Structure formats: C-alpha cells, structure tokens
Image (tube, grey):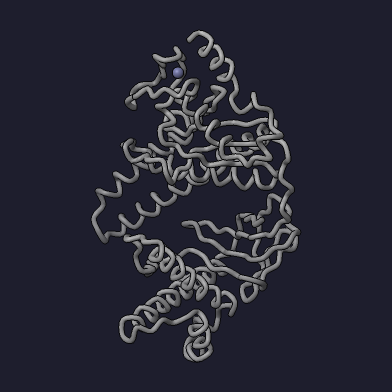
Amino acid sequence: MKRTYKFRIYPTKDQEAILNRWIETCRVLYNDCITERRDAWKQCRKSISCYDQANQLPEIKKFDDGLRSVHSQVIQDVLRRVDKAYQNFYRRVRNGDRKAGFPRYKGKNRYDSFTYPQSGFEIRGDKLTLSKIGDIKIKQHRAIEENVKTCTIKRDVDQWYACFSVELPDAPMKERIESAIGVDLGLTSIITTNTGEKVDPPTYLRKSGKKLSREQRRLSRKREGSSNREKQKRIVRRVHRKIRNQRTDFNHKLSRDLVNNNDLIVFEDLSIKNMLQNHHLAKSIFDAGWHQLQRFTAYKAEEAGKYVIFADPNGTSIECSVCGYRVEKTLATRVHRCPECGLIEDRDVNAAKNILKRGCECLPQELRETTPVEMFVGTSMKQETLCVSEG
Ligand SMILES: [Zn+2]
C-alpha cells in the first residue's frame, strides 16, 4: 500500500531561486519532449519511446547548462511524466474515449513540481537535504522512517512542500464487519448518514468561498496584460490554496471519524452520479471536496483493514428504503413520504439507507456470512416485517 506524506519546507531566497529554475528547466524539457513525439508521429508515423528520449539526453546536456545543473534523476523523471501522459492518452483512446486529447503543453502555471524518483534526498532532523541544492528547513509533523520511495518538491503559489511516497505493508482485512454506515453526499449537508447524522460544511469554508467569488470578480475587471491583473491573479491563487488547505484539513478529520467508527463505509459512486443537474455556484468547490473525502476515507480504511464500497447511486433518493417503492421527487422535495408503506423520512437519510443496502449487497459472500444481518438492514428490517403483516 502506497502513502504520500506532505510537509511544508522553507527554502531561503537563494534556494527558492534554484527550485524555481529547476521547475522551469523541467517544464521546458517536458514541452520539448511532447513536441518531439508529436513531430515524429506526424512526419513519419514513428512513435518515440521513453528510452529513445532518455538516450538522447547526454547529447542534449552537452549544449544545455540548465539541464546539466539539474539532478540527473530529476531529469529522468520528467521523461517518465511525458511517457505517463502518453500512456494515459493511449489508454483513453483504446477505451473508446472520443474526447481523449493529445498530452498538452504545460504553461508556466501548470507545471509546479519536480521529483527525485529514487535517491538524492534525505531528512535529518529539521533539514531536508536535496542533492545539488542543499539543506532546506522542513516542518515534519510526523516521522517517516519506512520505505521512502520518492521525493517530490512542489510549489504552491509562494509556498513550498516536499511530498514523500512511502511503501507500507498491507494491513490484514477485518474478517467480520460489526458496524457499517451509508453516506449520502450533498450540498447543504456535506454528508448525511443512514442513522440521520448530518455534517454541514464549516462556516470558514463558506466564507472563503465568498471571498473567492469576490476576488474573481475583481480579476475580471482588470485589464488584460496589466500588472494589476497579474497581482490579482496571485491573490486569487492564494485564496484557492487557502480553500484547498481548509478542505483538506476538514476531510482528514471527517474521514478519520468515519473510519474509526465503522468497519464498512458505503459511498455513492461519483463517476456514475450525475451532479450536473444542480447548478449550484459553489458546486466545483464541493465536487472536489467529495472526491477528496472518498479518497481519504478509502486509504485510511485500507490502512485499518476496513472496507469502503462505492455503490451505484441511481435512484437512491427515489426508492423507498423500506419497501422499495419509487417515490418521484424534485430537488426541492426534502422529505420522502411513501404511499406504499407509510415511511416518512428525511430525503437524504432515506438515500443514505439505500446506499448502505446496495453496498452490503456488493460484499463478498464470506463477509456477509460473518456479519450480523440486522446490521445490513438496520431499523428498516423491523418496519418491513411490520408493513408485510399489515398488508
Ligand atoms: Zn415504502
């Protein structure tokens, strides 16, 4: 199991200049590699591999001081990134994705990191030693002694981070599920669970969202190409970063709670769920947040040997969680009232119950056998028997 740890680093002005130069050198190389692959393909239908490009490096380096100043493994990693972009592209084409576009050139604000893929970095105390750069102060909020594989240095507007990917041993999966939860994702409440618990977005996130739209409006009024516009762009990027960081903190805590209190967590599969029907201003902010929450929960669960399932969300808010009858609703209908069995339930709680049910249906047989049945159906089981006897 792979994990990434991210720590803030504090380069001096001189070091920052080097980091910026390396990123720029890598970006130019990245774009050159893409050009070369494109041209080769266009002119002679020849595809160039990662190896071909790597073999040319020594020759190119002779004439390029910038490239020579960068650690050789960091350069190799740029070629790997190009190759990865192409492999993704080929895979999408193979899968019949008509929208698959050629790997794109990276503009100045679209290339923000470089990676030491094997060695050339070391943490000692509060210092991160980078080969060919030097010792940079690092704020490490947790120790990592395990198998560190790679080190990526990232720029985030005017802050710097070091990300370490670490290979951890797989945790043994739990053989028995004693507690399970279904989670409905929404806009007014970020999550609603089958037990009726709701978690609202924190007010600071809303405040930052408002600040973002305000600064974006200001940006749209600045003249194209003016220095004020550049300044305003930086401000907008900083607000984006703030929101990103707040959201990350929030999702770390929420996912930690979910995993600590449950052996099985069932989410809606967002790749199926169609959220576009909801034209909410802050949608994009929430959208990224949901994915992150799911990702964080999934890896924390994996570490703890617990289960996360992504269930088909189609119709979960329409179906009655007790009798299965379909009760059509508009987005404005907040309460589920079933004419068949008489269930009256908060719309999202009803959906969360359906999500949990569907997730349990996906469990492998051996897990279902060792898991108490009443937990799958929760209270709805009793109501179901009730409604049958009445009928
Ligand atoms: Zn019903």
Q: Nearer the viewer, residue 280 or 385?
A: 385
Residue 278 image offset from top left, x and y in percent = 33, 35
Is 144 on the left-hand or right-hand side of 248?
right
Q: Quadrant of residue 382?
A: top right
Q: Nearer the viewer, residue 343 or 23?
A: 343
Q: Is residue 71 visible to us here?
A: yes
Above or below — where is 90 with respect to 186?
below
Residue 238 image offset from top left, x and y in percent = 44, 50
Q: Quadrant of the N terminus?
A: bottom right
Q: How many marks?
A: 0
Q: Quadrant of residue 262?
A: top right
Q: Name the residue rendered at 52%, 13% in the picture.
A: 388
Q: Is residue 203 visible to us here?
A: no
Q: Name the residue rendered at 30%, 45% in the picture.
A: 218
Is 39 on the left-hand or right-hand side of 167?
left
Q: Quadrant of residue 31?
A: bottom left
Is 212 on the left-hand or right-hand side of 7?
left
Above or below — where is 43 with respect to 221?
below
Q: Nearer the viewer, residue 185 or 229?
A: 185
Ligand 1 found in image quarter: top left
Residue 297 image offset from top left, x and y in percent = 59, 42
